[in-house]
């Protein structure tokens, strides 16, 4: 997948799992959307999508975090990235970009859940009882020691479970709802959940 493919997939998934129009969100808030590849080999962030981002690329690469994916709502919320650009950032590593479609989708959904909470849009998602139960179950096997860093609080786990259920309802990509939920959190479950052969702990 190239940067445009990822952007279009993110838009599609936001509508599929939440009925959320990400393009309208960007337009209404006069925001840019920038996608970076996390290059673990070179320990650099490589731009995949976005315009006029040379200065941002240089600033982003002053710090590197060894991770599979990440989302930042408003680049100016990161002090060392203070800039005049109004943008949200999505970070994805090769293991996500080069994965099969369901594997990529579930991590994009994971980052979309972070986006919803950080942007204050989580209340637009209707949560059913199944999602509440699966969310509590997911939270109980999450890497609790790092929860303040990962922001994988109970609220997040319940929201992510609902989005995963909605994805499963729309795609039938997994055996059941729980398998879909686990895939979205497969890098943060203890013990690590090897949902797919390509998944990494």
Image (cartoon, grey):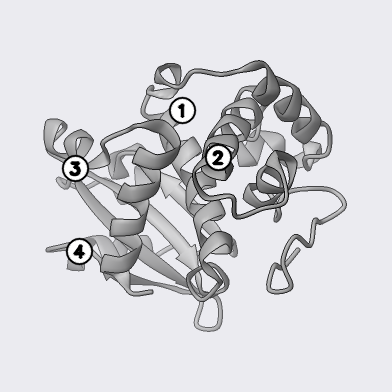
Q: CA distance from mark 4 to mark 1?
A: 27 Å
What residue is at 65 percent from the left and 35 percent from the top? 152
Q: CA distance from mark 3 to mark 2?
A: 34 Å
Of 124 and 150, nearer the camera is: 124
The residue wearing badge 2 is 169
Residue 61 seen by the camera: no
Packing grade of label 4 (10 A; few <14, some 14-19, many >=20) is few
Q: CA distance from mark 4 to mark 3?
A: 13 Å
Q: Is residue 151 left or right of residue 62?
A: right
Packing grade of label 1 (10 A; few <14, some 14-19, many >=20) is some
The image's mark for residue 117 is 1
Q: Secondary structure at mark 3?
A: loop
Packing grade of label 2 (10 A; few <14, some 14-19, many >=20) is some
Q: Which callout, 2 or 4, points at the residue further toward the start of the chain?
A: 4
Q: For the residues carrying marks 3 and 1, which lies nearer the camera in this image?
A: 1
What residue is at 31 percent from the left and 48 percent from the top? 11
């Amino acid at each position: 997948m190239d940067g445009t493919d990822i952007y279009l997939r993110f838009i599609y998934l936001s509508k599929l799992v939440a009925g959320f129009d990400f393009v309208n969100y960007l337009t209404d808030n006069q925001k840019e959307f920038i996608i970076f590849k996390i290059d673990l080999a070179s320990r650099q962030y490589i731009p995949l999508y976005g315009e006029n981002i040379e200065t941002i690329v240089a600033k982003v690469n002053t710090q590197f975090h060894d991770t599979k994916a990440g989302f930042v709502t408003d680049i100016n919320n990161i002090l060392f990235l203070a800039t005049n650009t109004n943008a949200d950032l999505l970070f994805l590593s090769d293991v996500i970009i080069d994965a099969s479609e369901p594997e990529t989708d579930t991590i994009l959904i994971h980052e979309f859940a972070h986006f919803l909470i950080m942007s204050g849009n989580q209340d637009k998602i209707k949560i059913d009882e199944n999602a509440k139960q699966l969310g509590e179950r997911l939270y109980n096997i999450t890497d609790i020691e790092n929860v303040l860093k990962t922001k994988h609080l109970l609220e997040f786990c319940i929201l992510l479970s609902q989005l995963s259920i909605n994805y499963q309802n729309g795609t039938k990509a997994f055996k059941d709802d729980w398998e879909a939920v686990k895939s979205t959190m497969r890098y943060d479950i203890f013990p690590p959940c090897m949902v797919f052969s390509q998944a990494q702990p």
